[in-house]
Amino acid sequence: MSNTATQAQPAPRAPGAIAVPKLSVRQIVPWLLFAALLALVGLYFVTAEQGATSLIAGNAVHEWVHDSRHLLGFPCH
Ligand SMILES: [Zn+2]
């Protein structure tokens, strides 16, 4: 009795098709956490830096993210 009928065979690829790698959740979670951390840092600089708090002296960060701050509804002046 042949066992080939129960084994999964890869689908034939069309010419020029790109193979999509299979990723597990364990491979993705660290990158999701890193992206969340970067998003939180970005959110801090847009919403609070040189407004409610100030880690960097001067007005450069405030001026750079000023329109984003108002677009998101955070008051600054
Ligand atoms: Zn403003």
Image (cartoon, rainbow, N blue to C red):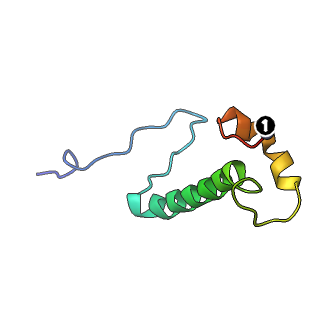
Q: Residue furthest left?
A: 1
Q: Residue furthest front?
A: 77
Tell whether circle 1 marks a residue whose Cβ is less than 8 angstroms from ligand 1: no
User: Looking at the picture, which amino acid does disc 1 mark?
Assistant: Asp
- Relative placement, left or right, of 32 versus 49 is left
Q: Quadrant of ligand 1?
A: top right
Question: Residue 17 location in percent, x, y?
Answer: 56, 36
- Relative placement, left or right, of 5 versus 18 is left
Say what secondary structure mark 1 lies in. helix
Q: Is residue 8 above or below residue 15?
A: below
Circle 1 residues within 10 Å: few <14, some 14–19, many ≥20 = few
Q: Is residue 70 above or below residue 35?
A: above
Residue at left offset 71%, top offset 48%: 46
Question: Residue 32 location in percent, x, y?
Answer: 51, 57
Please identify the quadrant where the C terminus is shown: top right
Question: Residue 39 location in percent, x, y?
Answer: 61, 53
Read off the residue under disc 1. 67
Q: Quadrant of residue 73?
A: top right
